[in-house]
Amino acid sequence: MKFLSSRRRHRAVRPLLLVAALFLTGALYTVAVPDERSSADAGTSTQVEEGRALFAVNCSSCHGLNGEGSSEGPSLVGVGAASVDFQVETGRMPLAAPVEQAPQKENIYSREEIDAMAAYVASLGPGPEIPTEAQYDPEGLTAEQIAEGGELFRTNCSACHNFAGSGGALPNGKYAPALEGVTPKHIWEALRTGPQQMPVFSEEVITDENVRMMIAYLQSLEEEPTGGLTLGGLGPVSEGLWAWIVGIGGLCLFAVWIASKGARK
Amino acid sequence: MAKPAALSEERTVPPTEPERVPGPVLKRLAGPTAWADERTGAAGLGKYFLRKVFPDHWSFLLGEIALYSFIILLLTGVFLTLWYKPSMAEIEYEGSYQLLRGVAVSEAFASTLDISFDIRGGLLMRQVHHWSAMLFVAAMFAHMLRVFFTGAFRKPREINWVIGVALLSLGLIEGFAGYSLPDDLLSGTGLRFVDGLIRSIPVIGTWAEFFVFNGEFPGDLIISRLYMAHILLIPGILLGLIAAHMALLVYHKHTQYPGPGRTDKNVVGYPLYPIYMAKAGGFFFIVFGVTVLMGATMQINPLWTYGPYNPSQVTAGSQPDWYMGWVEGAIRIMPGWEWHIGGTTWSWNIFLPGVGLLTLLFVLLGVYPWVEAWLTGDKREHHVLERPRANATRTAFGVAGIVCFSLFMIGGGNDIIAVMFNLSLNTISVVLRWAVFIGPVLAFIITKRICIALQRTDQERLLHGSESGVIQRSPVGGYSEDHRPISQGEAYTLTHHNEYPSLPEEGVSKRQLQARRWFYGDNMSKPTRAELEAAAHHGHDGHDGDGHDGDGNGHEVAGRESRELTSSRD
C-alpha cells in the first residue's frame, strides 16, 4: 500500500481518479440500464433494434441519434408508439422540408417498419400505445350515442376543425386539417398524442367510448345526403361567393340577353 | 343591342283605335272591362302607364333583380311561416334527422329541422328563401353601384337615392334577422356578435343589451322579437319604401344613357305595353327560375351540421352572410384598443369597426348626392346618365369604396383564405390593417388616371376616327395607318357629357372653387367645332406618313393638351 499512499499527492492522481470515476459510472450504467430495458420489452428486442436502425437513418437528423431531440425537432422520449404510428402512417413524418406544420403526404413505410420504429420510440419512455380495434372502431353504437358524439364533436373539436370537419386556420400559417377520410385509428391517435398544434385529450377527459362516438358521428355526417352541392362545406363565405358568381353573374348574362332583344331591328 | 328609333313620351304614336275592328275575345271582354273602368277608372291610369316608355339597357335590370328577389322572398317566406315556431323553449329533438335525435334544442331549431327534413318541399323552400335573400342584397348593391357610377342620383333623384340607401340598410337588418331565426350554432354566434356590438356602445351599452335581449344574452325572447321584425315590421317598411321608390321612378321617368336622339327632355325606349311587360315579366320568371335552381342544386346554410346554438361552442368558419362580412372583417383586423374610465369600459376595438363603420357607410352613401352637388356646383336637372369615365373623380370615389369594402370582406374570411391559399392568418390581418387605408387611395388615383386615359381615347376617336387596320407604306419608306371617321351617332354619344366649367363661377366661395378644380380639373374638355372640322378635313386628305400615331406628332399634341385641361376656362 506504500506504493499508493506515497504517491497520493502526485500530479497525475486527480485526472486519473476522474477517469476512473467516469469509467466506473459508465460501467455501472451499462450494467443497470440494459437490465431495465430488457425487462421492459424482452420479446421485441429484435424489433427495437430494427427500429433503432430505421430511426438512425430516417429520423435522427432532427430528433437526435437517441430520440433526445435537437434544435430541429422535439425529443421523442415518452411520446409513445401511437404517436409514431400516427405521424409516419399519415406521411407527416419524416418531414420533406422545414415548414410551419407537417403536411399530410403519402406514407412510404411498410407496416413492419412503422411497428419497428414505434417499438423503438416506445422503448425510450412510456407513452400511448397503438390502439386495438376495439378502442376506436365505431361499430355497434346506438343512434343516440352517435348523436351524443355530435355534441361532443361540436363542443371539443369544431372550434378548430369546423362544424363539418372541413378544417380551419390557426395562427401563423398553422391549421387544423380537414377530417374527411381520416381513418378512425388516426383520429384516436391524434386525440391521445396531440400531434402538431392539437392539444392532448387524455382518457380521463374523453373516454375511448366517447372517441368512438365522435368517429361514428363524423362517418355518419359524411354519409348523410346533402341539400345539393356542398360548396366546400365552409359556411357563409363560399355561399356568398357563389351567390355573386352564379346568382348575380348568371342573372346579368340573362339581363344582357333580354336588353339586346329589341322590338325593331 | 337593338337601337330603338326615337320615340319620346311627348310624341307617342297617335292611337289608331277607331279603325280597328275588335275580335271576338275583345268583344266578350268589353262588358266586364267597362264595368270595372266605370268603378275604378282603370282605363285612364292604364292609358298613362301602359304607354310609359322605358329605355333598354342590361344594367337597368339590376334593380329588377332586387325587386323580384323580394317577391320570391315574400312567397317562400309565407310558406316557411306555416311551420316555423319562433320559440326558444327547450325541447328534445325527435324528428327524422338521426344525428341530432335526443339532443336538447330550441323549438325554433327543431321546427327549422322539421321544415328541412319532414315537410314536403321544405328544404327547397328554405334554400330558395336563403339564396333569394343573398341575391336580394347583392342585387341592391349592384343596382346602387350602377346608379352611383352613372350619376343617376343627381337632381331630381336625390330623395329616391336616399330611399334606396334606406332600403339597403333595412335589407341588411332584415337579412340578419332572418339569419338568426333558426337558432343554430352559426346564427347564435352571429347574435353573440351583434350582442357585442350593442354592448360596445359607450356607457349605455349594457342597458341597450338588456333592452334588446330582455336581460342577459341570449335570454329567451330574442328569437320571437326578431321574428316579429323579420316577418312584419321590416318587410312592411320595405314594401312601403319600395312603393315610394317605384312611384318616384315613374314620376321622374327613367334615366337613359347618352346617345343620338336622347336628351334631358325625352326618354328613348319601348313602351311598357307590350314590350316591357314581356321583358320585365319574362325576367321575373328567369330570376325565379335561377333562384329555384340554386336552391335545388346548391346547399345553403346546412344548419343540421351546425347543430343547435350553444353559447359554449364556436365553430371554425363562423361567418355571417356575405353582406355583413365586411363588418366582421373590420372587427377581426382591429387592434384591441380599450379604455377604462371610472367604472366604464370603452371598447373601441368593437365600437369603431362595428357600430362606427356601419354608421359611416350609410351616412356617406346618404349624403353623397349633396356632397357632389357642393363639389361640382351643379344644381341642374339631369336625366341623361354619365358614362363612368366622363366623371373621373366620382368613379374614382366609387372604386375606392369598392376596394375598401372588399378588403374588409377579405378580413371577414381571413381564416378560410389562410387555409385555402396556405397563408398565415396573422400576416393577412397585419397586411389588411394597412391595406384598408392604402388600397382605397391607390384605387382612387389609378381609377382617376384610367378614366382620364379613356377620355383621351374618346378624344382620339373623335378627332382622328377609328383605326382601319390598313398599314400603308409611303414611297420614302415610312409607315402609317389609315383612320376612318366615326359615325355621327357615335360622335354624338362621345361628346354627350357635361362640361362642368361652363357653370357660372360668380358668387362662388374660394373654397368651393378649389373643390371644383379638384373635382373636375383633370377632365378633358370636348373638342370645339373648329377642331372637329379641322380634324375632319385632315382626315379626308388622308394620312401621309406624319400622322398622329407615329412619334412625329409631338408638337401638335403637346400644344393641344395644355389647352385641353379644363382648369383653364374655355
Image: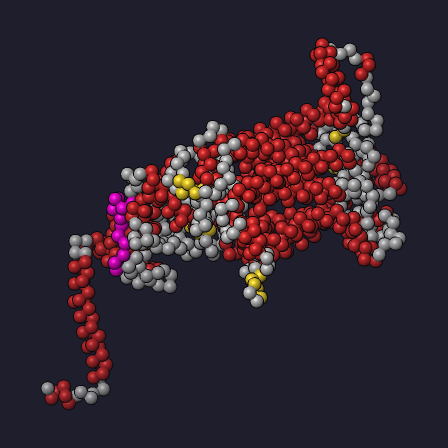
Hey, which quadrant is residue B204 in on the image?
bottom right
Q: Position of residue B379 (x, y in %)?
A: 82, 46
**In the foreground, A37 or B12:** B12
Locate residue A41 relative to residue B391 in the image: left or right: left
Residue placed at 19% from the left, 77% from the top? A20
Locate residue B401 relative to residue B208 in the image: left or right: right
Q: Which residues are magenta?
A: A125-136
Q: Quadrant of the N terminus of chain B?
A: top right
Hey, which quadrant is residue A22 in on the image?
bottom left
Asked whether residue A228 appears in the rendered view, the answer is no
Residue extending farthest to the top is B24
Residue placed at 78% from the left, 24% from the top? B44
Question: Which secondary structure class fits the magenta region best?
Answer: loop
Q: Position of residue B404 (x, y in %)?
A: 63, 51
Asked whether residue A146 appears in the rendered view, the answer is yes
Q: Please say whether residue A154 is one of the residues in the magenta stretch.
A: no
Q: Position of residue B343 (x, y in %)?
A: 55, 65
Locate residue A150 relative to residue A27 in the image: left or right: right
Residue placed at 55% from the left, 53% from the top? B209
Residue extending farthest to the bottom is A6
**In the foreground, B463 or A139:** A139
Q: Please state the total of marks drawn on the protein image.
A: 0
Residue placed at 71% from the left, 16% from the top? B32
Q: Position of residue B260 (x, y in %)?
A: 81, 33
On screen, B44 above or below B320?
Answer: above
